[in-house]
Image (cartoon, rainbow, N blue to C red):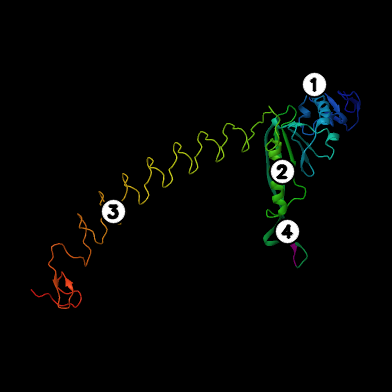
Amino acid sequence: MGLFEKKYCDICGEKIGLLGNRKLEDGNICSKCAGKLSPFFSGRKHATLDEIKEQLAYREQNREQLNGFNPTVTYGHRTKVYIDSQNACFVVSKKNNYREENADIIGFAQVTGANYNVEEHRSEIYHKNAEGRSVSYNPPRYEYSYEFKITITVNSPYFNEITFELSDNRPTSRYEESYHRFEQEANELINAVRGMGMPQPMGYQQLGYQQPMGYPQQQGYQQPMGYPQQQGYQQPMGYPQQQGYQQPMGYPQQQGYQQPMGYPQQQGYQQPMQGYPQQQGYQQPMQGYPQQQGYQQPMNQPQAGALQWVCACGCTNSGRFCEACGAQRNR
């Protein structure tokens, strides 16, 4: 077969122009037929003719189904994501007319993952020196821009990943209002394509869907406060006692509970200092209590068994000298 021998499309049979050939693993198709394939399909060179025919049949069915596609919310700017919450599906299109592009309809159940990342781009800023040459600042200065990229992974026989830029005008600082606006839009978009927060048709199973508060109980769902008791739920204060619950102060005694001051004595409780009967191991306070074993008598307290005497100045003392006037006791 010669280098410049004419080729014909194995799909439509039309003659392929000089630069219009698109090779397959076992054949050739023209650029017009190749343009009918999914824009997210990237394995054409390794695809067989039968696989391409199968995909083109799917694309024709997709075109017909788009007639019943009714988006309820739209995200994105240059590339847009149209959400049909009633039919639990969405399309991603770079054109304003997604029907003209024949955008692939993707069900929420096909989504296996969705996330976004922010890529920081920087370029150095220069200035002119005395000789008119562009030189770096010392230290170098940079200007920044931030690109928000969305990645959606799907379970499809023809493609498994959709990646596009969410932002149109890239923010130049993480503190700009537009930066936070793109953050919020990215999170809302991710929740939307996963079916989170969208009306769910009856009997429609979501893959990895997190149940919102107030819906019927799902496996692994954390019960909100005030709802009927669930296994592993931590009971709020003031509710009936649950296993492992720590009793608040003033409630009947629980095992391991530390008794507050002023309550009847519990095992291991340390007696408060004022006015309570003596407990085992209790150290007697210093003022006005009878002598205990090992207790050191405070200074200026009457010594047990000491003889008291009255000084001429009228002061009663137990020591050798008067505490008021310093006179020595006479015996």
Element type at mark 4: strand
Q: CA distance from mark 4 to mark 1?
A: 54 Å
Q: What residue range appears in magenta?
A: 125-129
Q: CA distance from mark 4 to mark 3?
A: 79 Å
Select label 1 or label 3 by which is in front.
3
Select label 4 or label 1 by which is in front.
1
Element type at mark 3: loop
In this orientation, which residue lies closer to the viewer: 94 or 53? 94
In this orientation, which residue lies closer to the viewer: 320 or 209? 320
Camera sees residue 26: no
In this orientation, which residue lies closer to the viewer: 242 or 82? 242
Of the numbered discs 1 and 3, the one sitting upstream in the chain is: 1
Of the numbered discs 2 and 3, the one sitting upstream in the chain is: 2
Q: CA distance from mark 1 to mark 3?
A: 95 Å
Residue 324 in magenta?
Answer: no
The furthest residue to the top: 50
User: Which quarter of the rendered picture does the N terminus lie within?
Assistant: top right
Q: Look at mark 4 in the image and give the residue it sits on.
A: 125
Q: Look at mark 1 in the image and give the residue it sits on.
A: 50
- Whether pointer 4 and pointer 2 mark residues with C-beta atoms closer than 8 Å, the reply is no
- Characterize the local packing of mark 3: few (<14), some (14-19) or many (20 or more) Cα atoms within 10 angstroms: few
Q: Look at mark 3 in the image and give the residue it sits on.
A: 276
Counting every numbered tag in the picture gives: 4
